[in-house]
Amino acid sequence: MILSYPVFKYMGMRSSLPLPSWKVVSIQILFYFILEDFIFYWGHRILHTKWLYKHVHSVHHEYATPFGLTSEYAHPAEILFLGFATIVGPAITGPHLITLWLWMVLRVLETVEAHCGYHLPFSLSNFLPLYGGADFHDYHHRLLYTKSGNYSSTFVYMDWIFGTDKGYRRLKSLKGN
């Protein structure tokens, strides 16, 4: 974290007035979510290869039924590997500090919600068709082996495109959801 400030400053981060418009903030954060999801999908899928799963990612999968704190419970190598996906968008765009803070807050909230273990009536997956949410990610944690599918962090389109959510979709159709 100490090193991130000079890096972001070098990449163009601002902290002075005027504040960016809500449109700029919204577009940047949407871009961050899409880019992060793309990078996270591939990184997470790689973490499910036999060797990396056994030596790194299995720490995160210690709990078959996730709860909010398991979102941050991971091997240090995994935190660095997947944390890169979270900071690459802001590093590219050089956002205002307010935008960066908002992005980090939304990203952590999304991560904890995906690992909360509950599909709540106010879950974003009830309102945003491409949002995965807790139910989607719970399926991933229930299958404790290397090819579990549902690798996306936020949205489900990458899993749908590459067919890594077939087991989840089959289960949902059998349950009639």
Image: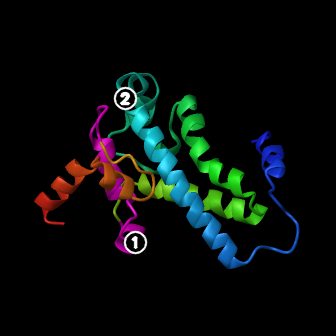
Residue found at x 80% / y 57%: 13
Residue found at x 73% / y 78%: 21
In the rendered image, residue 84, in percent from the top left (x then y), is placed at 61, 42
Relative to 35, is 129 on the left or the right? left
Which secondary structure lies at badge 2?
Answer: loop
Say whether marks 1 and 2 touch (CB < 8 Å).
no
Is residue 44 visible from the viewing direction of this image?
yes
Q: Residue furthest left?
A: 174
Q: Is residue 173 above or below residue 65?
A: below
Q: Is residue 134 above or below residue 21?
A: above
Q: Which residues are magenta?
A: 120-148
Circle 2 residue: 49
Q: Residue furthest right?
A: 16
Which secondary structure lies at badge 1?
Answer: loop
Relative to 69, is 54 on the left or the right? left
Circle 1 residue: 128
Residue found at x 59% / y 42%: 83
Residue found at x 45% / y 52%: 153
Assess whether residue 128 is covered by the magenta stretch: yes
Of callouts 1 and 2, the N-terminal one: 2
The C terminus appears in which quarter of the rendering? bottom left
- Under mark 2, the amino acid is Thr
- Under mark 1, the amino acid is Leu
Assess whether residue 147 is covered by the magenta stretch: yes
Res. 95 image quadrant:
bottom right
The N terminus appears in which quarter of the rendering? top right
Nearer the observer, 29 or 98: 29
